[in-house]
Image (cartoon, grey):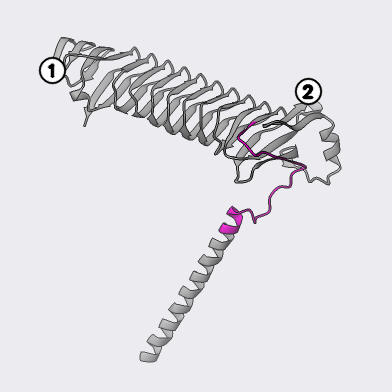
Amino acid sequence: MGWILLKIKKFVMKILASLKMYTMVVMLISLFSINGFSKDEEPTITKTFDLKQPGTLNAKSSGGGVTVETHDQPQVVIQAFVRKNGTVLEPSDPEVKEVLEAFNLNFSKSGSTVTAIVERKSHTNFWNNVGISLTIMVPAEMSCKVASSGGGVKISGVKGTHDFSSSGGGVHLENVTGTTEASSSGGGVQVVKQSGDIRLSSSGGGVTLEDAQGNVYAQSSGGGVSLKNIRGNVEASSSGGGVNVSGESTSVRAKSSGGSVHVDIRNLSKELNLESSGGGIDAVIHNGKKLGLDLDLHSDKVNIELQNFSGKSEKNRVKGTMNNGGIPVNMHASGGNINVRFDE
């Protein structure tokens, strides 16, 4: 019996060793892929410009999307990819020359400003299945003005003053620092980790912003607006969906004609103004029982726990003060109820 158990033990150890080796191989493959050892698409054109100071990028494409990423080199690297029927052509492909002749390209530098512009010469149907997309590597301290009418815009890691727009796809921003404006009529606008005041608008989809420090203006006529973990004043509106706001905001103004309004905030000290004609209003005000509030709430039904209240409280209307008043809190819902909760 002992030798059988010994064989079983050796067999199990062999399996575990194999599994360990397999895991290490998978990890190494993943690591190589992350660090660029996997096979990438080869750009048709590559231009490099040295830049020894914070600079400005002016990029525009009418034939494809634009991606901007940061690296630790004092230079701007522009890569242009020729696409046909959704596939990147090899630089040696004989069709590349013909496609390039349909576009005006301007890759240049003047002072600390780098320009990367791709414009179609013609808008005939013959060229609708081709385009040129841009991938641009820049130093972190780079103010960016980026526009695309042939695809989406993707930006990450830059610091400066920024203006991003797309009429051919969505706008995706991550870890952007500085005063920022982003708009899209071809898709939604999505932002993660923003530091600095930001203005977002979309008529082609919704607007989402997560983890931001700075004042926020967000508007959408193509979908809802979702602002999560915001540390700054907020003004948000939507005619294409609901509005959701959470975080630490001294002032919130939110309006929706396409859905409900949901707010969950801390540090209220200036104003809370909520309006919905497409649904109800749900508001959570942290430490609200300790605040002086001037209340004006109106809907089919108002649900709120009042204390130290002076004024008029009815089923569909509450108007008066809590704790002797102070901060204006106005809510109006014509499409549902108003629910207000005070959390610690």
Q: Position of residue 34 (x, y in %)?
A: 58, 53
Residue under numbered circle 2: 123
Label 2's element? loop
> Disc 2 residue type?
His
* Magenta residue check for 203: no
Range of magenta residues? 31-56
Q: Position of residue 53 (x, y in %)?
A: 62, 36
Residue 1 visible at all: no
Q: Residue 47 or 32: which is nearer the viewer?
A: 47
Q: Position of residue 317 (x, y in %)?
A: 23, 10
* Magenta residue check for 50: yes
Label 1's element? loop
**Residue 73, picture quadrant:** top right
Query: Relative to 72, does residue 151 appear above or below in the rendering?
Result: above
96 lies left or right of 166: right
User: Which label's residue is closer to the chain start, 2 or 1?
Assistant: 2
Residue under numbered circle 1: 308
Number of marks drawn: 2
Residue at horizontal 58 percent and vertical 30 percent from the top: 170
Instruction: Judge the density around disc 2: few (<14), some (14-19), many (≥20) Cα neighbours within 10 Å.
Output: few
Which residue, as the protein is rendered here, is positioned at the far left?
Answer: 308
